[in-house]
Amino acid sequence: MESQTQFKRRFSFEFFPPKTPEGMEKLQVVRDKLAKRKPDFFSVTYGAGGSTRERTIDTVLTLHRQGISTAPHLSCIGATKESIGELLDLYRSNGIQRIVALRGDLPSGMGAPGELRYANELVSYIRERTGDHFSIEVAAYPEFHPQAQNAEADLNNFRRKVEAGATSAITQYFFNADSYFYFVERCEKAGLNLPIVPGIMPITNYSNLARFSDMCGAEIPRWVRKQLEAYGDDSASIRKFGEEVVTRLCERLLAAGAPGIHFYTLNQAEPSLAVWDNLNLGDKISF
Ligand code: FAD
């Protein structure tokens, strides 16, 4: 973990682009609460195969204009270089300086992979088209990507993204701190020198979390799963227990030198804020 301590810590909150005007109003309230903590940036997801293209653009530009630097996620699967190039130009001309570059997942049975098949190809394309303008974040998988052939192939893939020009990485969420420490150590041994920021999912609802974790290959430890199951419909207890588990996880990560935290907010302020405040991060990060 030694290498991670050289990087300045940064804290960020991720949103998805709302589907309705009411959703956008709700996001504004969430945004205002989180903005008070002065995060380094917000980010906004991009739906599979470009399904949220316009909504992602609107949400990114709205949040960015309101004063907190905002990073669009951009996935390449199913897209043409031309359509990605147009997005890059639009973001650059609107003062956006950071992109979260992903392959994405095509919904089953939907279309061809497109001109850029993997995230490393997208990173290369962004560098080719826009030089050093953007900071580029890529995804990392301490518990391995579900489609990876094996552990070695997954690390080699990560290396390809770094060598293509990624500036830093955000991990898939995990609840087992050792998986993160082990991943970072493997990167250190492989000579990959970039900030690897833990992505953290607050726990608020067991069935959604279990379903999503199965899909993305994140493991819910047995003791956490059993305890969450035991709470049944008691959502107050789930939240309280979830807050404790996630706070302790973040404490361990930061104490060991993790270079910040990226919160998957699911467009809710309170669960991330509770953890933030438990960690005494204050409203301005200064370490
Ligand atoms: P890649 O790095 O391209 O890897 C995908 C798989 O292909 C891996 O198994 C890898 O080992 C393998 N691979 C890579 N290169 C090669 C190669 N050359 N040959 C053979 N195999 C290879 N999804 C969205 O749709 N929208 C979002 O906004 C979004 N945001 C995310 C944010 C974060 C921080 C994270 C961690 C994930 C996000 N995702 C999002 C999910 C992501 O799109 C999926 O996990 C997707 O399956 C992989 O994307 P990737 O960029 O990691 O792909």
Image (spheres, helix red, strand yellow):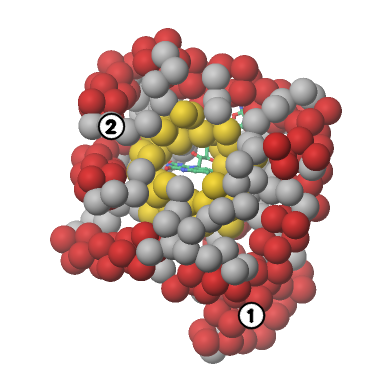
Expressed as whole percent of the image width and height from the top left, the position of residue 82 reads 28, 16
The CB of the residue at mark 1 lies under 8 Å from ligand 1? no
The answer to whether residue 171 shows anywhere in this view is no
Residue at 41% across, 26% down: 134
The answer to whether residue 50 shows anywhere in this view is yes
Relative horizontal placement of residue 97, taking residue 253 as reference (left or right): left
How many numbered callouts?
2
Count residues near mark 2 (Cα–Cα under 10 Å), then give few for <14, some for 14-19, many for 20+: some
Disc number for residue 27: none
Disc number for residue 95: 2
Q: Is residue 19 above or below residue 229?
A: above
Q: Secondary structure at mark 2?
A: loop
Mark closest to the chain's N terminus, 1 or 2: 2
Q: Work out whether residue 76 or residue 167 is closer to the camera in this orientation and state it.
A: 167
Expressed as whole percent of the image width and height from the top left, the position of residue 75 reads 41, 32
Amino acid found under the numbered disc labelled 2:
Gly
Q: Quadrant of residue 177?
A: bottom right
Q: Which residue is mark 1?
A: 241
Q: Is residue 203 above or below residue 122?
A: below
Count residues near mark 1 (Cα–Cα under 10 Å), then give few for <14, some for 14-19, many for 20+: some
